Image: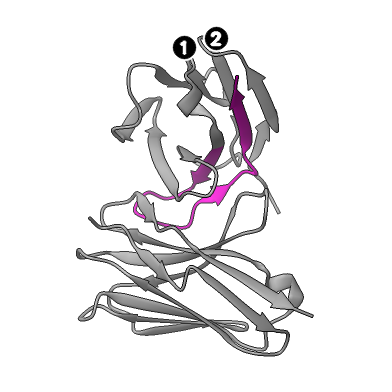
Amino acid sequence: EPEVTQTPSHQVTQMGQEVILRCVPISNHLYFYWYRQILGQKVEFLVSFYNNEISEKSEIFDDQFSVERPDGSNFTLKIRSTKLEDSAMYFCASSDVKGGQPQHFGDGTRLSIL
Amino acid sequence: SQQGEEDPQALSIQEGENATMNCSYKTSINNLQWYRQNSGRGLVHLILIRSNEREKHSGRLRVTLDTSKKSSSLLITASRAADTASYFCATVGSYIPTFGRGTSLIVHP
């Protein structure tokens, strides 16, 4: 069964540094998402992406965050200047249909900010 | 807030028993989804129930939805140790699912 893959599985970064989290969505999917889960907390929506542009974003997704689909397979989340509170699991998801249909999640990248 | 809230926060049962988890929400929805998350892994979609549906089955899973009470339940019958995980409901109004805090289920062999 096709999977969403995320790299790296764990990223350790110094505060203030830029970090790029990478995702390869399922190949025939058109809608892409990033979520964040702080340890022990609920999964929080960050941003959705379709047709090479952001469709929707949450309050969490401020100017420090950006997303990009640099080629036909990768989908990236960049945090420009990381803060301690950015430490969390970041999940990428994709779906083939818009409208609340099931999303397929990757196993996440654990981001640790020192 | 549209956010679903699961109840209980934690549930511990013996293998073979049934597990019931509840989800309550506050605003109207198009559909409600249940996901499972094993420790250290991503979310796995289990079942989706639309706002005009009342009950849905998938294998050992049974989901109910009561839109008048703004609540849903997930029943896992004949639980197995492998069912140990966190279970989240996600409410969908437009097209972005909003997740609750989850129920942590432990099934003892």
Left or right: A21, with B100 as reference point: right
Q: Position of residue A81 (x, y in %)?
A: 46, 11
Disc 1 residue type (three-letter): Ser
The magenta stretch is A90-114
Residue A81's mark? 1
Quarter of the image that includes the C terminus of chain A: top right
Name the secondary structure under disc 2. loop
Q: Which residue is pictured at 25% across the width and 64% down the height?
A: B29
Q: Foreground: A12 or A62?
A: A12
**Could you say which quadrant of the image residue A47 lies in?**
top left
Answer whether residue B38 is magenta in the image: no
- Chain ID at mark 1: A
Earlier in the chain: of badge 1 and badge 2, it is 2
Q: Position of residue B27 (x, y in %)?
A: 20, 63
Disc 2 residue type (three-letter): Gln
Residue A17's mark? 2
Are the two marked residues, 1 and 2, in contact with CB atoms closer than 8 angstroms? yes
Left or right: A32, with B37 as reference point: left
Q: Position of residue B109 (x, y in %)?
A: 79, 80
- Chain ID at mark 2: A
Q: Which residue is pictured at 50% across the width and 40% down the height?
A: A38
Name the secondary structure under disc 1. loop
Q: Is residue B87 above or below residue B99?
A: below
Q: Is residue A73 visible?
A: no
Q: Foreground: B19 or A65?
A: B19
Q: Is residue B86 visible?
A: yes
**Could you say which quadrant of the image residue B55 lies in?**
bottom left
Q: Is residue A6 above or below residue B23?
A: above
